[in-house]
Amino acid sequence: MKANQFIIIGLGRFGSSIGQELIRLGHEVLGVDRDEEKVQELSKIFTHAIVADATEEEVLRSIGARNFDCGVVAIGDDVEASILATILLQELGVKKVVAKAVSELHGRVLERMGVDRIIYPERDMGIRVAHQLVSPNLLDYIELSKQYTIAELAVPQCLSGQSLEDVNPRGRFGCSIVAINKPKGIIIAPAANDVLAEKDVMVVIGTNEQIEQFQHSLNK
């Protein structure tokens, strides 16, 4: 996989977590923050980390922000700084701009600015945890859009030994099993004759309603 270059503005828990995972995946990361302590802490982990004010256009120009594949604005405690940094990344021509929103209003502003992706860490985690609490088979839940969801569902005992053809989630509920994670490895685009076992994890995609109906059928 080609290594991409990311610039992350704001090195709090959210920004530092994204940066560390990108480094682990083999990408290059430049971290930017006003806080010298945060920068020092991550300077040995990130490709580069610098103390700078990302709301200053000349600062972003001098560090070559326009040459990065993706800019992540992870500022969480200063909405004005978040918006300014986002505008500057867009104006400098960064290919893709992702921004953290701390409220619905902040998110609407970012949406009107044409940000490529808006992330609501606290809200999204709250939604995922709530779904996990009410469905014992749900391991993870990611909303792809207002209508579509991808979910990881543990195979219950009642489905163990059944093939995908037997379970037939597409015919019964309209959702599709796009992968099966087995202890020995993952099966991508499984065939109708692939058999489920109790310790397997199904990766399911469909509308929210379709997946809820499928989940409900597993709990009976």
Image: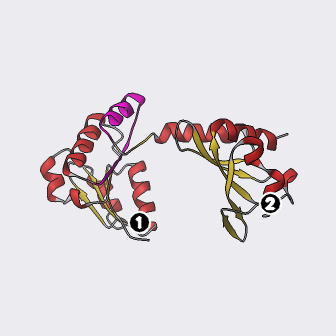
Q: Position of residue 213 (x, y in %)?
A: 74, 37
Q: Position of residue 47 (x, y in %)?
A: 32, 67
Sort mark 2 into few (<14), some (14-19) or many (20+) by Cα contacts within 10 Å.
Answer: many
Q: Please state if 22 lies on the left or on the right of 33 as rendered.
A: right
Which residue is pictured at 78% across the width and 54% down the height?
155
Residue stretch in magenta: 95-114
Which residue is pictured at 20% across the width and 46% down the height?
91
Sort mark 1 into few (<14), some (14-19) or many (20+) by Cα contacts within 10 Å.
Answer: some
Q: Do we see residue 137 in this rendering?
A: no
**Which residue, given by chain and number where applicable, does mark 2 sit on?**
196
Which residue is pictured at 70% across the width and 62% down the height?
190
Pick the quarter of the image with the C terminus.
top right
**Which residue, given by chain and number where applicable, does mark 1 sit on?**
23
Image quarter of residue 134: top right
Q: Position of residue 206 (x, y in %)?
A: 64, 44
The numbered mark, 2 or 1, whose residue comes first in the sequence reads 1
Q: Please state if 211 lies on the left or on the right of 52 as rendered.
A: right
| Residue closest to the eye, 138 or 162 | 162
> Residue pushed farthest top?
105
Q: Is residue 137 above or below residue 193?
A: above
Q: Amino acid at mark 2?
A: Leu
**Residue 100 on the magenta segment:** yes
**Residue 61 on the magenta segment:** no
Q: Please state if 119 lies on the left or on the right of 138 as rendered.
A: left
Which residue is pictured at 39% across the width and 58% down the height?
19
Q: Is residue 90 above or below residue 123?
A: below
> Residue pushed farthest left?
58
Image quarter of residue 133: top right
